[in-house]
Image (cartoon, rainbow, N blue to C red):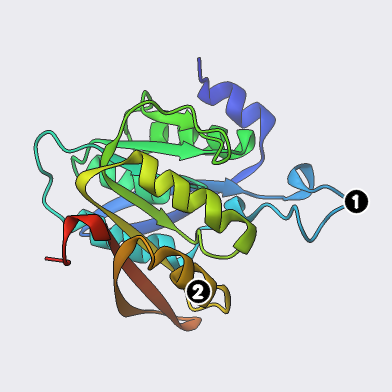
Amino acid sequence: MFSIDAFHRQYQTEVRESVISKHPFRFLVPQRLEQFLDPEDLFHQFPLWTKIWEASLVLAHRLAATPPVAGQRWLELGAGLGVVGIVAAVFQHHITITEYDAHALNFIRANAHLNQCPQDRIEHLDWLQPALARRFDRIVGSELIYNEKDFPALNRLFKSLLKPGGEILLAGEVRQTNRAFLELMQADFHIEITRNTLRSEEGSVAILLLRMRPKNEGAMP
């Protein structure tokens, strides 16, 4: 069982605050990254989950503005610190938040606790050996499109975990890997792309929102 006291004994943290659809949120982030780094493989194993990505905030705003539908079940892949899923849950969406990294899962549970969000739908998920036995009406994720080696596994996950009539909503920065992802996915999915700009004191970042629906279910509504 998760203990917030044990969490704070294990990790040094800082708080990041954000207001999404007029609702204040607070998220714990690691203060230092040393305990998450592999000194022999700093590049390939860098803990990307330790940052609140701009794409996560864009997607969180989008989901917060989406009215909840009774009976719908959502799934978040690669949740990182849990921002997207926690915001969705606070705005009354029934969402299962998943992540592979054990440290990230601890931070998700701590952030769920901090924002008074249910913790019973936070689960470990290995994309190569998914243990989920149910399907979902919507699959969401932010910054999943960066490692081409993951794309085939994501394609299989989408096809196996999405309910008939469901859709996928992804957010991410503009990257060179986007083309390879789209080329793979467009064989099975209708894809609608919109561009969003997130502005802050540090500047502006272009974020792509991808809405995907299976091709065997007809054109995108």
Left or right: 1 as drawn, with respect to 212: right
Give percent across and percent down for residue 107. Answer: 54, 38
Residue 94's disc is none
Which element carries disc 2, helix, strand or loop? helix
From this view, report whether residue 93 is shown above or below residue 65: above
Nearer to us: label 2 or label 1: 2
Left or right: 210 as drawn, with respect to 105: left
Q: Looking at the image, which residue is at 54% across and 54% down?
A: 152
From this view, report whether residue 67 is shown above or below residue 190: above
Q: Can residue 214 be seen from the camera position used here?
A: no
Q: Can residue 92 be seen from the camera position used here?
A: yes
| Badge 2: residue crowd in 10 Å (few <14, some 14–19, many ≥20) | some
Give percent across and percent down for residue 74. Answer: 27, 41
Left or right: 137 as drawn, with respect to 52: left
| Residue that extends furthest to the right in the rendered view of this protein | 40
User: What amino acid is labelled 1 in the image?
Assistant: Glu
Q: Please tell me which residue lies in front, 217 or 10.
A: 217
How many discs appear? 2
Left or right: 39 as drawn, with respect to 216: right
Q: Please tell me which residue lies in front, 60 or 123.
A: 123
From this view, report whether residue 81 is shown above or below residue 184: above
Give percent across and percent down for residue 133. Answer: 38, 25
CA distance for labels 2 and 1: 29 Å
| Residue that extends furthest to the bottom in the rendered view of this protein | 203
Q: Please tell me which residue lies in front, 156 or 210.
A: 156
Give percent across and percent down for residue 128. Answer: 58, 39
Q: Looking at the image, which residue is at 48% across and 55% down?
A: 16
Residue 178's disc is 2
Residue 40's disc is 1
| Residue that extends furthest to the top in the rendered view of this protein | 1
User: What amino acid is labelled 2 in the image?
Assistant: Asn
